[in-house]
Amino acid sequence: DIQMTQSPSSMSASLGDRVTITCRASQDIGNYLSWFQQKPGKSPRRMIYGATNLAAGVPSRFSGSRSGSDYSLTISSLESEDMAIYYCLQSIQYPWTFGGGTKLELK
Amino acid sequence: EIQLQESGPGLVKPSQSLSLTCSVTGYTITSGYDWSWIRKFPGNKMEWMGYISYSGSTNYNPSLKSRISITRDTSKNQFFLQLNSVTTEDTATYYCARELGGPFAYWGQGTLVTVSS
């Protein structure tokens, strides 16, 4: 199975901060990387697919990027509604595997 | 608009089978796409469990070995998860989901299943 190592596992940031979360794949996954946001009591919401494509309805302050086997989700200016757990997912090879999650809290 | 909704018992005894239903509205499950089950464990780990395709073929996570079965009832536009021989480690929130242009664009609201005697 492809291992997705996500970091950090938790972080706190202030409103307006630029926030970056990273996933590293244990083998080549090309651009088959998605990011999901999950708020307490809610279903996950897809934010990014294909490593860099913004999902429908997602604010433009979210972006995805890739550098080799490292994939990043960036929030350009943190808002209170962005407090959530974020997960990456690789979908190039079954079984599809998630990163361990990043819990983003307000400082 | 497509909607997915999970249903099933919230409590299952160890060694028994867990059975969940995903009811789909707004799209016919035989028209296209793969229809997946995903679970989130206490402590936030997420696991893709498997899918049934629009044609009825299935693909399962090998970690679940022979315990899992995903089937469907096309007349009711539903698909099902059965997980056999459950243990307390199968306690999780279970979601059904569908792709669109990439994985898991649509999700159900999730259902918590607790395995306990």
Image: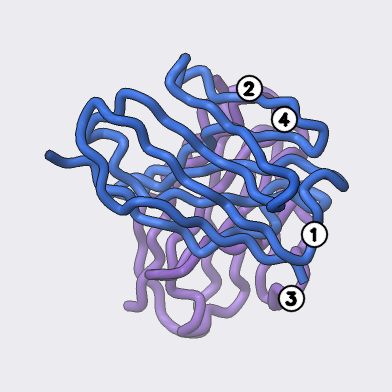
Chain colours: A purple, B blue
Q: Which of labels 2 and 1 is toward the front?
A: 1
| Residue located 55% across and 20% down the image | A1
Q: Contact, CB < 8 Å: mark 3 with mark 1?
A: no
Dot 1, crowdedness within 10 Å: few (<14), some or many (≥20)?
A: few
Tags 1 and 4 touching, CB below 8 Å: no
Q: Which label sits on residue A92? A: 4
Task: Using the numbered discs, state the Cα–Cα distance from disc 4 to disc 2 in whole angstroms.
Answer: 10 Å
Q: Say which residue label 2 marks.
A: A27
Residue B9, how many percent across, how many down? Answer: 34, 51
Q: Position of residue B79 (x, y in %)?
A: 62, 44
Residue at image position (71%, 30%) is A29
Is the residue under label 3 in contact with that under label 4 (CB below 8 Å)?
Answer: no
Mark pair 1, 4: CA separation: 26 Å
Amino acid bearing label 1? Tyr
Q: Which chain carries label 1?
A: B
Work out whether mark 3 precedes mark 2 in sequence or the reverse, and give the earlier one.
Answer: 2
Disc 2, disc 1: CB below 8 Å?
A: no
Numbered disc 3: secondary structure: loop
Outermost residue toward the right in this view: B31
Residue under numbered circle 3: A57
Distance of label 3 from label 2 (alpha carbons): 31 Å
A65 lies left or right of B81: right
User: Could you say which disc has been placed on residue B50 in the image?
Assistant: none
Mark 3: give few (<14), some (14-19) or many (20+) Cα within 10 Å: few
Is the C-beta separation of discs 4 and 2 under 8 Å?
A: no
Q: What element carries label 1?
A: loop
Q: In which quarter of the image is the C terminus of chain B?
A: top left
Q: Which of marks 4 and 2 is nearer the N terminus?
A: 2
| Amino acid beneath label 4 | Ile
- Dot 4, how many residues are within 10 Å of its Cα: few (below 14), some (14-19), or many (20+)? some
The answer for how far apart the CA atoms under marks 4 and 3 are is 25 Å
